[in-house]
Each structure stands twice: as structure tokens, then as C-alpha cells.
Amino acid sequence: MGEQEHQEGWGFETRAIHAGQPADPASGAVVTPITLSTTFAQDGVGGHRGFEYSRSGNPTRAALEACVASLEGAAHGLAFASGLAAEDNVLRLLDRGQRVVLGNDAYGGTYRLIAKVHAPTGVEWSAADLTDVDALAGDWPVGTAMVWLETPTNPLLTCLDIEAIAAVAHERGALVVVDNTFATPYLQQPLRHGADIVVHSATKYLGGHSDVVGGFLAVDDDELAERLRYTQNAAGAVPAPFDCYLVLRGVKTLAVRMDRHCANARAVVDLLVAHPAVDRVLYPQLPDHPGHAAAARQMRDFGGMVSFTLRGGEEAALRVVGATELFTLAESLGAVESLIEHPGQMTHASAVGSPLEVPANLVRLSVGIESSADLVADLEQALTHA
Ligand SMILES: Cc1ncc(COP(=O)(O)O)c(C=O)c1O
């Protein structure tokens, strides 16, 4: 049986460890070597062995691309130097006058890239409430060529129905891009629900240890993959081989980490829903959470991100984020250690004054994989400052 046939029959955890990573044929090394060489010897002009120049293709990157593509159930994977570099590569598919519709609750950096970098070049954009698919269909913005969504969203964790949005978009000839950073392919595989392109900030759960910045695209369609790969090489925002190795290493434990992230998030949610200082808890498993039904259909579990608002307003939120001892006050998410932040003044500051502005009394948690009792105790003491 060839490697490809093996991979199709393998379970998620097996593919995370083995897909695209056979023992090195030259040495037998079990771990994919970090190939630093920028150029590759050719047997004759045009007679290369799969690699010519490391911007165009590199063996360590190829292993990562094959592995994460397999986890997303995609025919093609493309790795980038950051999540935003991957997003930029996708947005370059749009011509002047074409429109991207962005969910009105999305990562501030995505909003900034679209509104401040691509819009000035002539790309049209608008924000939409993608929880209301009928409204999207009824009021389809002129010229829309792409619908861009996150599910769960950052930072409100709203879940969107990928299948329903894809049906509306495809009927009107638009591509659907899903940022799967929060869910990861372990919890949700958007291509199976009709998405055309999956985007990742590999900096988050894929890397999983807060020690590498990276991005990823997963695509099934050959022609679309060809266009994206052309720009990947032509614009050149590719990751270093060492960074590819770090993401590959992170991905090997993705399933076990995600199981623990989800279990710890549940323990934290139990504390928060019962706490008098807390106004609202945002977590996709809660039955009244926006998009809970879609999340229950699309996702294996509900993830490691938890957001909440405080009755005491922004001042209380700022006091709480400053009072934790185990949760580190920091941007980013998705790694083994727990983080806390104030989206309004930190990760989403670039969205102030835009349709994507977030509530000032909001706190976001990236629940790590420490002992859950320690995490709950830390939040309990921090909330006494609310
Ligand atoms: C949902 C989401 N998408 C994309 C990005 C951008 O990724 P990167 O920081 O790796 O460029 C982030 C970063 O926080 C994110 O949270």
C-alpha cells in the first residue's frame, strides 16, 4: 500500500504523527529533518528531484503542508510565515471592484488587513452579521466574490453555520473562506461543510507552545490551489524550515491537547456561570450561546477559548485581567499555558470605531492544559477584584 492510500485509512491522531512524514530515506531519521538548504542540486537542466529553491518548495515545509492538509481532509496545503501572510495570499485572489464580506465579529487583524491594506487597492469590503443567513441571502452585497468567516469567532465565540452560508455564497458564485484557528481540524473540518479555503494562524493551537508564528491554507480544488501556490511563491511569504518543524512537532499532540483544552474550558465555564460578578459567559457549549446548534453539528467538542463580560464594566474587566497569577496577561492564544486578555484594548484595539468593535467589559481566556483546579482557583481569586 502506498503512503497516500495508508493516509486515507488512518485516524486523525495517526495522520497527525505520520502523514507526510515517512522516515527520512537518506538516513532513516524518524523525525522529519530540518532542511536549511536554500537550493537543491539538479541532475541536468530542469532535472530536479522535487525541489529547486526553498521559497518555491522546501522538504520540511512540504512535510508540514502534507500533514495539515491531511488533517483538514484537503487535497492541498500551503504553509506561510504567519496567519496574516496566509490571509493576504487569499485576499490577492480578489480583483479591483470585487467584494469580500467579512463576518462582523472577527479577528481585528483580519479587519485591518482587509480595510486598511486591500481596500485602498480597490477591493470592496463590508461587514455582515453572518448568524442571519436569510438576511445575507436577501441583501446580498453587489460584487461579492468572497465570504470570510470565523467560527467560533474571535473574541465573542459566536458559531456560524458553514453549510448554510456556503449554500448561499455558492449559489451566487462566491468563495467561502473559513478561519479555523479557534476550532482546529481536530474539532472541525470546514471543507467537509462546503468551505472552499481554510485559513489558520498556526501560531495558535497547531504550533501549540507559543514559540512559533505561522500560517496555513487548506484547499481541495486543484485550480484554486494552483492560484494560491503561484502567489505563495511570487509574493514569497513562506515560513522558515525551523518554524515548519516546530509546527509539525506541535501538530503531533494536537488531539490530546485539544481534549484537555476543552475539558479545562468546561471547568472554567462552570465557575463563571455561577459567579455574581460575571454578566455573560460566552462558550459554544452553552445552550443559549449564539450558534450553539451549528457548533453542536459541526464540531467534535467546543474548544478551549472562553470569553465573559463583567457587571462592573470596563474598569472591572481591567482589574480582573490584572489580578490573575497563573493566567498570564498576554495576547495570542491556543498554547499549553493559560492566557487572559482585554480584547478591547489589546487584540482588537485595531477594530475600535469599526463595525467589529468589541464590548469594553469583555475578557477573553485561552484556557491552557494546566491542572484545572489551579486554573479555577486562580480565576476565583482574580474575580474578587471585579
Ligand atoms: C482567528 C485568527 N486568525 C488569524 C490570526 C492572525 O495570525 P498571525 O498572528 O499568526 O498572523 C489571528 C491572530 O491572533 C487569529 O486570532
Image (spheres, rainbow, N blue to C red):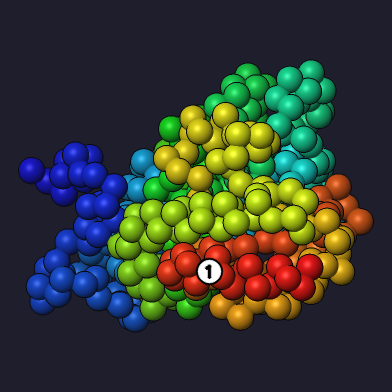
* Residue at the image position 62 percent from the left and 68 percent from the top: 379
Q: Nearer the viewer, residue 56 or 300?
A: 300
Query: Looking at the image, can residue 154 be seen?
Result: no
* Residue at the image position 22 percent from the left and 52 percent from the top: 14
Q: Nearer the viewer, residue 10 or 214?
A: 10
The C terminus: image quadrant:
bottom right
Asked whether mark 1 and ligand 1 are closer than 8 Å, the reply comes as: no
Question: x, y percentage for residue 210?
Answer: 50, 75
Question: x, y percentage for residue 48?
Answer: 26, 65
* Residue at the image position 56 percent from the left and 70 percent from the top: 377
Residue 221: name its quadrant: top left
* Residue at the image position 44 percent from the left and 54 percent from the top: 263
Q: Which residue is mark 1?
A: 375
The N terminus: image quadrant:
top left
Label 1 environment density (alpha carbons within 10 Å; few <14, some 14–19, many ≥20): many
Callout 1: SS: helix
Q: Does 26 sit left or right of 225 as displayed?
A: left
Residue 250 vs 103, above or below: the answer is below
